[in-house]
Image (tube, rainbow, N blue to C red):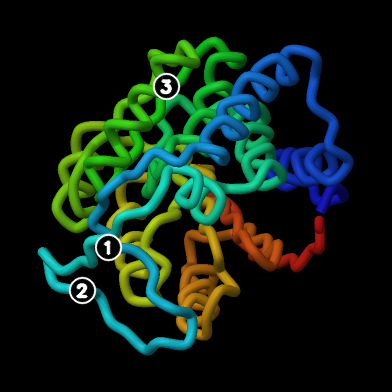
Amino acid sequence: MSRQPDAASKSLAKVLRGTLHNRPTSEEKVWIEKIESLRNELNSSSEKVTLMDYGALSSDESCVEPKTSEGKVKIETIGEVCRTASKPYKWSFLLLKLIREFKPSVCLELGTCLGISASYQAAALKLNHSGRLVSLEGAESLARLAEGYFKKLGFDNIEVVVGLFQNTLKDVLEKNAPIDYAFVDGHHQEEPTIGYFRQILPFLSDRAVLIFDDISWSDGMKRAWSTIKAYESVKVCVDLSYVGICIIDNSKDRKENYKIDIS
């Protein structure tokens, strides 16, 4: 990848090397320590939170996109939510490195949860001295908690939009286009994932970066990833087993597909 002539492939190779070898800069370490301290605090929290879960079902369950108001009421501790749903350090660090390298102005996240991954992305934007993140979350209880944590960490560059993605995404895209970066994490099913990609695609800037979570989580998500990377405008695709990265480039003729293990 680093031997490719285009700048995007070289930049992506640099990001993956930095993530693999866990090489944060001194200024990145400051933010990482703050966010990981919050993660540790949340992991041990026994505070209860009631939420309506609209996201993934079990990986062996065949399902299609739910109706507008469908969901499952759950009561969990914040610790349980953080341990099971927040992105681990390595993948959060990858998001930080992507934003540091590609320097997007407008970033989109589908799936705020408790805000750990959003905090890594917002920290990268802070370090870049520009850019903002719009993060969508279906569960209002989680969104309000995340907003409190963002305030605690000192972030003023994150906007949280509450509601089902299918109800909020269109308006967010129209208000914030062009989108330079999107992290899709929060509805781990085949048809919704493809649908969100198709909806986001017309609003992307050229050479936009897209990240899809849990691309190998189920047969449906594997099919979704195969569909997405086959799109003509998707010119660079990297399969990291758990996460897929795409770069949009309408000026590039040939496609590049990579499968890399950074575990």
Look at the numbered disc 3 and give the secondary structure of its residue: helix
Say whether marks 2 and 3 touch (CB < 8 Å).
no
Q: Amino acid at mark 2?
A: Pro
Q: Amino acid at mark 3?
A: Phe
Residue 66 numbered tag? 2
Screen quadrant of the C terminus = bottom right
Q: Earlier in the sequence, mark 2 or mark 1?
A: 1
Depth check: give the residue in front, 24 or 150.
150
Say whether marks 2 and 1 touch (CB < 8 Å).
yes
Q: Quadrant of residue 109?
A: top left
169, above or below 39, in the image:
below
Q: Residue at x 41, y 47 (%)?
A: 77
The CA span between labels 2 and 3 is 30 Å
Residue marked by disc 3: 150
Locate residue 219, reporting x and y percent: 52, 85
Q: Residue at x 49, y 53 (%)?
A: 85
Locate residue 200, reporting x and y percent: 33, 52
57, above or below 167, in the image:
below
Q: Earlier in the sequence, mark 3 or mark 1?
A: 1
Residue marked by disc 1: 54
Q: Is 113 on the left-hand or right-hand side of 29?
A: left
Depth check: give the residue in front, 234 or 62.
62
